[in-house]
Image: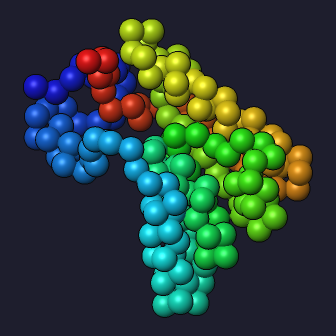
């Protein structure tokens, strides 16, 4: 049975759609080695650059967003962070490395980030993540970088939250 859907959700209804969605998920069963993950992704990005002659645009999402801040900057032309699990802290090593390499960054956030239901613990988490991304972009741009945060509901694009999943 599919979880309760948010009003206005564009995600298809029914068990078949829900099952297909769960097939693309990676279980978060333990901690992961950030350095090893960043090194593996960096190797892929280097190979893309070698094969194409161009630095690729790196797209990150959710927990993978953290990996995006640690990849080798010489092999990327930009970062697209879709609801990343955080932004680098201003003046951190990650922040300075990205700024020095002049990596443009764009963040995208969908519905219910800062106004999610109070009975879902992650509502507060995502509110903080989104606010941190705006703070990152403000500081990054003030320091000469190029960062943008796109709040999809604020520009009239809604229905991007699949369903409501309560804490277990």
Give the x, y percent position of residue 141.
83, 49
Seen in the image, is 29 located left or right of residue 140?
left
Give the x, y percent position of residue 3.
21, 23
**92 or 55, which lies in front?**
92
Give the x, y percent position of residue 11.
29, 36
Q: Is residue 42 above or below residue 154?
A: below
Residue farthest toward the top in the current orientation of the protein: 119
Q: Residue 105 appears in which quarter of the rendering?
A: bottom right
**112 or 129, which lies in front?**
129
The answer, for residue 17, to whether it is visible in the render is no
Give the x, y percent position of residue 92.
75, 48
Quarter of the N terminus within the rendering: top left
Quarter of the C terminus within the rendering: top left
Seen in the image, is 61 located left or right of residue 156?
left
At horizontal 19% and vertical 32% (from top left) the residue drawn is 13
At horizontal 49% and vertical 54% (from top left) the residue drawn is 34
């Amino acid at each position: 049975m599919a979880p309760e859907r948010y009003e206005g959700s564009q995600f298809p209804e029914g068990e078949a759609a829900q099952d297909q969605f769960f097939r693309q998920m990676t279980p978060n069963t333990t901690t992961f080695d950030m350095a090893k993950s960043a090194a593996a992704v960096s190797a892929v990005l280097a190979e893309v650059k070698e094969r194409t002659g161009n630095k690729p645009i790196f797209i990150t999402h959710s927990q993978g967003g953290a990996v995006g801040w640690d990849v080798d900057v010489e092999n990327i032309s930009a970062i697209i962070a879709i609801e990343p699990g955080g932004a680098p802290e201003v003046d951190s090593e990650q922040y300075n490395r990205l700024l020095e390499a002049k990596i443009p960054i764009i963040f995208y956030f969908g519905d219910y980030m800062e106004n999610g239901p109070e009975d879902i613990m992650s509502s507060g988490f995502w509110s903080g993540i989104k606010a941190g991304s705006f703070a990152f972009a403000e500081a990054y741009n003030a320091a000469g970088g190029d960062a943008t945060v796109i709040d999809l509901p604020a520009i009239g694009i809604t229905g991007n939250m699949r369903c409501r999943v309560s804490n277990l």
